[in-house]
Image (cartoon, grey):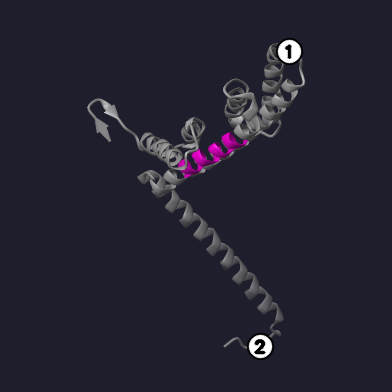
Amino acid sequence: MVIGKYRIGLRTLKTSVAVMCCIIFFHLTHRGSPMVATLAAVFALREDMSTTMSFGKSRILGNTIGGIAGILYYICLLKLPNQSIGEIFLVPFFVLVTITVSTRLNNQKGIIGGVATLLFLCFSIPKTSSFTYAIDRVIDTFIGTLFAILWNYLIKSPLEDKEETLEEKKEALAQKKEEIKTLEQEIQTLEKNIPPGTPLD
C-alpha cells in the first residue's frame, strides 16, 4: 500500500493490527498495562511465519529468564539492611546472570527482552507485588507473541504463499521418491524369490 511518498508494507500493517489486538484484549480482560505484550508482539512479528515462531520462542524464553532473575533479585534485596546499596550491586549482577544464562541456552535473540523484563521488575513496580508481576509479565509475553503468530498466519504475502506452495510440492516430491524407492526394493526382493527359468507372463 502506498500513501503519497510513504509505503506501508504488509509486515507493518500486521504489526499494527497485532498491537491493536493486544490493547483490546487487555482492556476487555482488565489486565492493566499492555506494554510488555505489545512490545512482545512487535519483537516477535517478522517477515514470515517461521521467523516469527523463532523470535517468539526466543522472546518467551528471554522473558522467563528475566522474570526468574527479577524474583531472585527481590529475595536478595529484602535480606539486605541497605536496599539502595544493594540495588547498586545486585541489579548489574542479575543483568550479568540473565545475559550469561541466555547465551548458555543459545538464546541470544532473547537477551534484550530478558534484560528489559528484569529491569522492569527492578525499577517499575512496588516491592510487595514483584512475584505476581514477574509471572504476569511472562504471561503478557505469551499473549503478545500469540497475537503476532496469529496475524502472520492469517495474513500472508503473495511471495510467502508461493514459497509455502513450493515447499509443500517439494515435500510431496520427496515422499513420492521414497515410495518409488520402497517399491523398487520390493520388486528386487520378489525377483530374488522367483526360481530361475520361471516364466513371468
Image quarter of the N terminus = top left
**Which image quadrant for residue 55?**
top right
Across and down, in percent, residue 112 comes to: 58, 26
Q: Is residue 168 magenta?
A: no
Across and down, in percent, residue 35 comes to: 48, 30
- Using the image, tell me which numbered label, if any, was put on residue 198: 2
Image quarter of the C terminus = bottom right
**Which image quadrant for residue 191?**
bottom right
Name the residue that disc number 1 marks: 82
Q: Is residue 183 above or below residue 118?
A: below
Q: Amino acid at mark 2?
A: Thr
Please indicate, yes or no, whether residue 62 appears anywhere in the rendered image: no
Category of crowding for the residue at label 1, using alpha-carbon neighbours closer than 10 angstroms: few (below 14), some (14–19), many (at least 20): few
Work out whether mark 1 precedes mark 2 in sequence or the reverse, and give the earlier one.
Answer: 1
Of residues 110 and 94, the one nearer the viewer is 94
Segment colored magenta: 135-149
